[in-house]
């Protein structure tokens, strides 16, 4: 099992929605197959950090399902987002951001709980993305 650090939308209160159970799925998408496409498995651990620069892991969850789409048309992409809105609980801005992407990854998350906040060492991750595959979280914990 692999640990991942996942940046979540601070403005949309994504972390709070995950912790409260209002949201049980996260989404990533791109024009091509970029992280985390094909690199997340059921059982993996997700450590959540807000995308507001504070740099603290504040919650953890376990991957319960993964769906990596084939290449989608814009219409199919928006339809996939709509079909999963109950679990995704996206804001309008997030819907606009992810809908229309050619490749989407839908990741079900369970057992989400707050953790004692901690920082991670990001020095080995050259291009800072919103998804970091860290292997074992203990390796990057500060």
Image: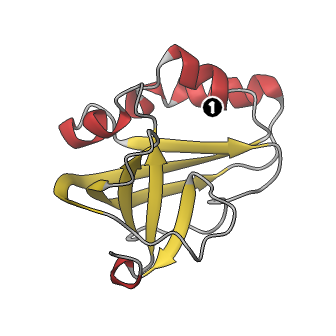
> What residue sits 44% from the left and 72% below the top?
121
**110 in relation to 45, above or below:** above
Q: Is residue 91 above or below residue 101?
A: above
Q: Is residue 80 left or right of residue 121?
A: right
Image position of 142 (left or right of 134) = left
Q: Which residue is mark 1?
A: 80
Which residue sits at x=36%, y=53%? 48
* Residue at screen point 47% across, 49% down: 7
At which x and y percent is residue 19? 22, 42
User: How far across and how far down the image is residue 102, in percent?
Assistant: 80, 39
Residue 10 in which image quadrant: top left
Q: 58 or 75, which lies in front?
A: 58
Comparing 85 with 4, the one in front is 4
Residue 4, relative to residue 99: is it above or below?
Answer: below
Task: Name the image quarter holding residue 126.
Answer: bottom right
Whether 86 is drawn above or below 1: the answer is: above
Q: Is residue 94 left or right of residue 52?
A: right
Residue 39 is situated, as x and y percent measured from the top left of the image, at: 61, 69
């Amino acid at each position: 099992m692999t640990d991942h650090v996942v940046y979540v939308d601070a403005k949309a209160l994504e972390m709070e929605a995950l912790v409260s159970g209002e949201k049980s799925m996260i989404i990533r998408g791109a024009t091509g197959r970029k992280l985390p496409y094909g690199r997340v498995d059921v059982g993996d651990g997700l450590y959540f950090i807000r995308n507001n620069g504070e740099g603290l892991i504040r919650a953890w969850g376990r991957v319960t399902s993964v769906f990596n789409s084939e290449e989608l048309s814009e219409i199919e992409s928006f339809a996939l987002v709509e079909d999963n809105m109950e679990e995704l609980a996206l804001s309008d801005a997030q819907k606009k951001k992810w809908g229309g992407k050619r490749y989407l990854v839908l990741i079900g998350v369970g057992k989400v709980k707050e953790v004692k906040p901690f920082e991670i060492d990001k020095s080995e991750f050259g291009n800072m993305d919103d998804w970091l595959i860290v292997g074992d979280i203990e390796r990057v914990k500060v």
